[in-house]
Amino acid sequence: SSSTSNHESNTDGVISTSQATGYLPWENDLQMMSQFMDRKDSLMKDHSKFIEEYPELHAILADYMQALLIHKPEDTYKFAREFFAPFSPILPPQPSHLSHSFK
């Protein structure tokens, strides 16, 4: 049977991948949704554990966000590179973000 959506159902009622878009509606697949939720929970636990082991991470990121919002740089990648350069053991020392004048 044809429909106006990109999803087609086979005779078992299982939604298949649309040939036109290649989209797999995984949200409708209980097994895939279960795997996604399990992986999501695992990553959240792992990330929380890492943050607990390195409390300075929260302070560094908070400082970065504050500096980013204060300076509002046009080139956020350059700003991040300059902000985090003093923390890098492999890059030569560069001036801190604090040496930049406020706009």
Image (cartoon, helix red, strand yellow):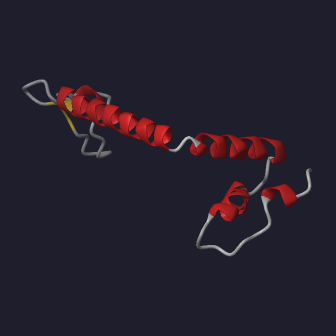
Q: Residue 25: in sight, yes or no?
A: no
Image point (61%, 65%), residue name: 88
Q: In which quarter of the image is residue 76?
A: bottom right
Q: In which quarter of the image is residue 2?
A: top left
The answer to whether residue 97 is above or below residue 66 is below
Image point (75%, 41%), residue name: 66
Quarter of the image containing the N terminus?
Answer: top left
Outermost left residue: 12
- Left or right side of 44 for 94: right
- Left or right side of 61 for 99: right
- State how many labels appear: 0
Q: Where is residue 46 in the image (x, y as percent from the top left)?
A: 37, 40
Q: Work out whether residue 60 or residue 53 is closer to the camera in this orientation and state it.
A: 53
Q: Where is residue 6 in the image (x, y as percent from the top left)?
A: 30, 35
Image point (32%, 28%), residue name: 4
Q: In which quarter of the image is residue 24?
A: top left
Q: Residue 54: in sight, yes or no?
A: yes
Q: Work out whether residue 51 or residue 22 is closer to the camera in this orientation and state it.
A: 51
- Left or right side of 63 for 89: left
Outermost bottom residue: 92
Q: Where is residue 91 in the image (x, y as percent from the top left)?
A: 63, 73
The answer to whether residue 66 is above or below residue 15 is below
Q: Position of residue 21 (x, y in %)?
A: 32, 45
- Left or right side of 10 for 30: right
Q: Work out whether residue 50 or residue 27 is closer to the camera in this orientation and state it.
A: 50
Image point (17%, 30%), residue name: 31
